[in-house]
Amino acid sequence: MKMSQGVEWAIHCCALLASLPAEVTMRLEKIAEFYDLPLPYLRKQFQALSRAGIVTTTTGPQGGYRLAKTAAETNLLQIYIAIEGDDPCFKCNEIRQQGPTAAFQKDYARPCGIARIMWNAERAWRRELEKATLAELVSDAAKEIDPAKQAASAKWIAACLAER
């Protein structure tokens, strides 16, 4: 399975928003700056996140983005679907019904073993993403990130929010 880098970007950016107090917003330009991402491309990701109800935006001097729901209510599957869509990753084309030894559809009462395995794998993958919330992601990151890096990030965020 291959997914766009927009999924990674969206998850990181939502985790950044999840680390802020609930009512605090951050301008998209600052989010892009925090990760050194191109603003026009990130804007497209945030439009998708907004349409999906994952983030919300406020206009005005104190405006910006924040999570629409709590970090505990927002999971990685929701973010993935917002960016990539909800189409299945694997589509069975039933190539068993092609070629010189092709049989009729009625001869294949069940999907082939390949399709069943791929669909089972996708269901498992989706279950794992659905279980993983932004709250858990932020909590785990706080345990793994060097305290000096955490302090530098907190200082940068505080300065960014004070600029408004």
Image: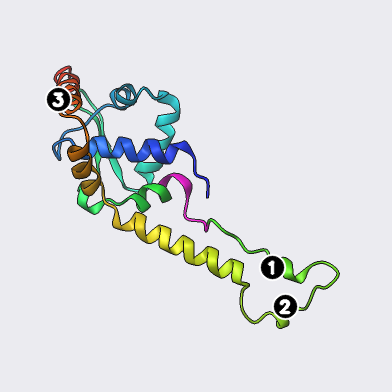
Q: Quadrant of residue 161?
A: top left
Q: Amino acid at mark 3?
A: Ala
In the depicted structure, whether residue 111 falls above or below residue 88: below
What segment carries the magenta color? 82-88
Would you name the residue on which mark 2 appears?
105
Task: Name the image quarter holding the C terminus.
Answer: top left
- Looking at the rendered structure, the secondary structure element under dot 3 is helix
Cα distance, mark 1 to mark 2? 9 Å
Which type of secondary structure does the marked residue at label 2 adopt? Answer: helix
* Mark 3 in CB contact with mark 1 (< 8 angstroms): no
What residue do we see at 60% from left, 67% from top? 114
- Name the image quarter holding residue 141: top left
Q: Is residue 138 above or below residue 39?
A: below
Residue 32: where, in percent of width, then height? 34, 25
Marks 1 and 2 close (CB-CB < 8 Å): yes
| Percent position of residue 53, x then y | 32, 48
Q: Is residue 69 visible?
A: no
The amino acid sitting under disc 2 is Gln
Residue 85 shown in magenta:
yes
- Taking the view exactly as shown, the residue that stands out farthest to the right is 100
Residue occupying the point 78% across, 77% down:
103
Q: Which residue is mark 1?
A: 94
- Nearest the eye: 53 or 97: 97
What is the spatial separation of the Cα atoms under label 3 and label 2, in whole angstroms?
62 Å
Q: Amino acid at mark 1?
A: Glu
Q: Residue, x 18% and y 44% (percent of image)?
A: 139
User: Looking at this view, is 32 or 2 the one in front?
Assistant: 2
Q: Quickly name the residue at label 3.
A: 151
